[in-house]
Amino acid sequence: MDDNSFGARLAAARRAAGYNQTEVAKYITEAGFPVRTQAVSKWERGTTLPSARQLVELCRLYHIRDVVAAFAPAEERRAVRTLPLYRLAVSAGTGELLDGTDYDTVEVGDEVSPNVDFGVRIAGDSMEPRFVHGQIVWVHRQETLRSGEIGVFLYNGAGYCKRFERVPGRVELVSLNPRYAPIRVAEGDELRVFGRVVG
């Protein structure tokens, strides 16, 4: 197996974190995504691939913060610029969510759109299936959105990633997960647009 393949890198990350395949399967299963030890073995041999949610859990278990640097082929890992990645996850922030200096600087390649100004992490499952807990979303900084666009907002002191919708007489912040009711923005509420999600 090519030592630079996704499966080989996945196996190396597991060994570096000090886990065996059985322990990994148990962790992923307990996280809510049932998997057997044989599946972990197949991922590492390159026979099959983990789902996006399983990969998020693997990265959490292995303490991997930069998926591209960890798993992408060498030609895709070349950093072309740096971007701020804010530490406060959207959906649980404060008024200083994206205004302060509480961010890490990350290097990104051309897999991230040149229109991106910063990144934030998703918290919770309200934007599934498109965005999952722990995923980084990349944002173009702008102060207005068109109806139907997904953005990052400050609403009454908390940070959110939602779809912006104009309906007769009001604005709503809509989750992609149908289990969550829209947030109806009332007159007098504080709503600020930080930007549009572009990836």
Image (cartoon, helix red, strand yellow):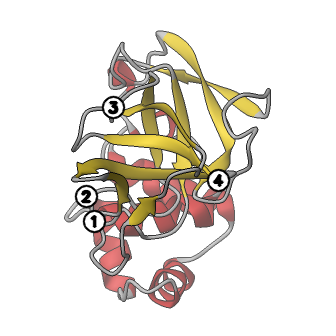
Quarter assignment of residue 138: top left
Q: Earlier in the sequence, mark 1 or mark 2?
A: 2
Q: Earlier in the sequence, mark 2 or mark 4?
A: 2
Say which residue label 1 marks. 129
User: What crowding class fits label 2: few (fewer than 14 Cα within 10 Å), some (14-19), or many (20 or more)?
Assistant: some
Amino acid type shown at disc 3: Leu
Q: Is residue 3 visible?
A: no
Secondary structure under the numbered disc 3 in the rendered image: loop
Closer to us: 103 or 155: 155
Residue 130 in picture, x, y percent from top left: 28, 57
Q: Is residue 151 visible?
A: yes
Amino acid type shown at disc 2: Gly
Q: What residue appears at the point 48 percent right and 63 percent down from the top-left corner?
A: 133
Say which residue label 4 marks. 156
Foreground tag (1 vs 4):
4
Is 189 left, or right, of 8 in this rendering? right
Foreground tag (1 vs 3):
3
Q: CA distance from mark 2 to mark 4?
A: 47 Å
Q: Earlier in the sequence, mark 1 or mark 3?
A: 1
Label 2 close to label 4 by CB (< 8 Å): no
Quarter assignment of residue 20: bottom right
- Residue reaching furthest right? 101
Secondary structure under the numbered disc 1 in the rendered image: loop
Is 103 left, or right, of 42 in this rendering? right
Q: What residue appears at the point 39 percent right and 53 percent down from the top-left corner?
A: 162
Closer to us: 95 or 88: 95
